[in-house]
Image (cartoon, rainbow, N blue to C red):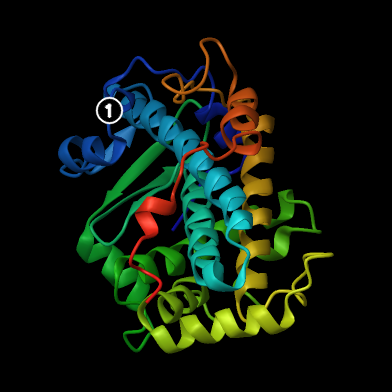
């Protein structure tokens, strides 16, 4: 699917704010309920403005969640919770990937709805609304059915889209905009599902973590199984997304309900994610009878 180029993405992000129908509540519900029946959204119309403001608000929300899930995964880096660390890192990547697409004008609510840039000239940007049938045709061209399911479909379309911005990304981390070495577009959801739905593989990760993890330095080699690829995919996707938030001056204040009044996004992330600690409560009563 097409995304905005660098120049049109900067124009798309100009003067974004909260006061539109698309940003007043759930953007997903708004897109499904109000935009799904449209065919084309043209710059200068109320539908386009609602989409633009709502999508960038949603992108900021998703970026915050991506940072939070990434940071909390480090709390889970112990043998017994290593499967949960991998799942947290997966969702960090998923949230930040959706956020990155939003910065470039693309909304994917797989498998039912997609809204993609059609013409990219600032002042005359237009967007095409794609239905379930169209998205299904895009992901199944030349495939053997391996892209069934909303997350597999999302990753297929994501990797096909973000390759367009690789020339504008730091070469040290741009590799994350392609599938992990030797794997296809669904490597993240496939490895997450293996841990999430198969007790054998989840416990094998616990065992491998117990035997091999070296806390003196986190690297792809020190983390067992697919933990390393997931961790660095999450980190580098967040870095890329953060850079475009800064470069495009996107600060839509979607996080106003969190933290202190008048805090900017960076301050909220530092306070609520990086500096936050667990509440001091007694968990022992909640564990009675479980160690049998």
Using the image, determine if residue 168 lies above or below residue 191: above
Which residue has dot 1 on it? Answer: 25
Q: Which residue is drawn at 30% across and 64% down?
A: 135
Q: In which quadrant is the C terminus drawn?
A: bottom left
The number of numbered badges drawn on the structure is 1
Using the image, determine if residue 38 lies above or below residue 97: above
Please identify the quarter of the rendering in which residue 265 is found: top right
Can residue 103 be seen here? The reply is no
Coordinates of residue 198 in the picture (x, y in percent): 38, 84
The one of 117 and 59 positioned closer to us in this rendering: 59
Coordinates of residue 15 in the picture (x, y in percent): 51, 17
Residue sitting farthest toward the top: 262
The one of 59 and 228 positioned closer to us in this rendering: 228
In terms of secondary structure, where does tag 1 sit? loop
Q: Residue at x 36, y 53 (%)?
A: 286
Label 1 environment density (alpha carbons within 10 Å; few <14, some 14–19, many ≥20): some
Q: Which residue is drawn at 55% across and 10% down?
A: 262
Coordinates of residue 177 in the picture (x, y in percent): 63, 62
Q: Which residue is drawn at 65% across and 40% down?
A: 242
The one of 205 and 101 positioned closer to us in this rendering: 205
Coordinates of residue 99 in the picture (x, y in percent): 49, 44
Please identify the quarter of the rendering in which residue 73 is found: bottom right
Residue sitting farthest toward the right: 216
Answer left or right for 215 relative to 263.
Answer: right
Q: In which quadrant is the N terminus drawn?
A: bottom left
Answer left or right for 267 relative to 109.
Answer: right
């Amino acid at each position: 699917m097409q995304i905005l180029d660098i120049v049109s993405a900067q124009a798309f992000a100009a003067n974004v704010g909260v006061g539109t129908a698309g940003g007043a509540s759930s953007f997903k519900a708004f897109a499904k309920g109000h935009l799904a029946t449209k065919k084309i959204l043209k710059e200068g119309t109320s539908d386009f403005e609602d989409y633009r403001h709502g999508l960038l608000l949603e992108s900021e929300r998703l970026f915050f969640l991506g940072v939070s899930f990434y940071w909390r995964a480090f709390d889970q880096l112990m043998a017994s919770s290593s499967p949960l660390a991998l799942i947290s890192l997966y969702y960090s990547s998923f949230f930040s990937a959706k956020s990155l697409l939003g910065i470039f004008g693309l909304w994917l609510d797989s498998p039912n709805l997609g809204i993609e840039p059609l013409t990219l000239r600032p002042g005359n940007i237009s967007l095409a609304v794609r239905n379930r049938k169209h998205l299904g045709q895009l992901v199944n061209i030349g495939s053997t059915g391996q892209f069934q399911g909303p997350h597999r479909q999302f990753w297929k379309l994501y990797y096909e889209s973000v390759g367009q911005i690789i020339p504008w990304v730091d070469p040290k981390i741009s590799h994350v905009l392609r599938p992990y070495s030797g794997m296809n577009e669904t490597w993240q959801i496939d490895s997450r599902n293996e841990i999430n739905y198969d007790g054998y593989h989840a416990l094998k990760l616990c065992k491998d973590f117990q035997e091999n993890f070296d806390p003196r330095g986190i690297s792809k080699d020190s983390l067992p199984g697919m933990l390393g690829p997931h961790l660095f995919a999450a980190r580098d996707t967040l870095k890329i997304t953060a850079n475009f938030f800064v470069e495009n001056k996107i600060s839509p204040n979607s996080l106003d309900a969190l933290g202190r009044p008048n805090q900017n996004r960076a301050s909220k992330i530092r306070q609520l994610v990086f500096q936050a600690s667990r509440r001091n409560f007694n968990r022992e009563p909640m564990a009675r009878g479980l160690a049998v």
